[in-house]
Image (cartoon, rainbow, N blue to C red):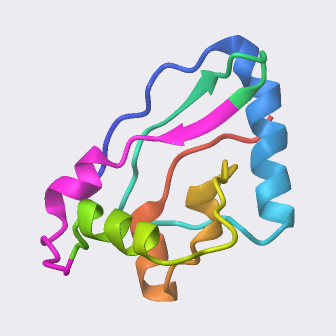
Amino acid sequence: MHRQQYRTNRDSLIPIHKLIRQLESQGVISRTHSPFNSPMWPVRKSNGEWRLTVDYCGLNDVTLPLSAAVPDMLELQYELESKAAKWYDTSDITNAFFSVPLAAECRPQFAFPWRDL
């Protein structure tokens, strides 16, 4: 599965390059050679910073569906309300996608292109 890279905004090149190097130095992403390629495109956040996003629609198209037991949201809400919980939490997870480790055999499928500056 190989998709052509989207056009990249020039203003995003250096910030995205720094983000990719940071994720690489943290061991979150690594360089690879893969037959898979999903297009990456930067998105400017409301505060002016840049977010790294990757279009995995093509990967989704070639991935076999996984039938999993998805809990009913109303049932979960009822469970929470019926318990005498002392604490509830709402969290904003930054870079949540990068916090889920991929199995080594799956990593090539999540490849995206980037050039060194």
Left or right of 112 on screen, residue 38: left
Residue depicted at 41% across the width and 74% down the height: 82
Q: Is residue 68 shown in magenta?
A: yes
User: Which corner quadrant holds the N terminus?
Assistant: bottom left
**In this view, 46 is above or below 65:** above
For this rendering, which residue is in front, 86 or 100? 86
Q: Residue furthest bottom?
A: 104
- Quadrant where the C terminus sits is top right
Q: Is residue 75 left or right of residue 94?
A: left
Q: Would you say residue 24 is visible in this rendering? A: yes
Residue 106 vs 19, above or below: the answer is below
- Residues rendered magenta in the picture: 51-69
What residue is at 69 percent from the left and 13 percent from the top? 10
Locate residue 17, reporting x and y percent: 78, 38
Q: Position of residue 13 (x, y in %)?
A: 73, 25
| Residue 91, position as x, y percentages in the image | 67, 53
Residue 90 colored magenta? no
Q: Residue 73: name its quadrant.
A: bottom left
Residue at image coords 19%, 67%: 63
Q: Position of residue 66 (x, y in %)?
A: 17, 76
Q: Residue at x 24, y 48 (%)?
A: 58
Horizontal side, residue 4 vs residue 98: left or right: left
Number of marks present in the image shown:
0
Quick check: 116 above or below 49? Answer: below
The answer to whether one can see residue 1 in this image is: no
Q: Give the quadrant of residue 75.
A: bottom left
Horizontal side of 39 relative to 66 (left or right) equals right
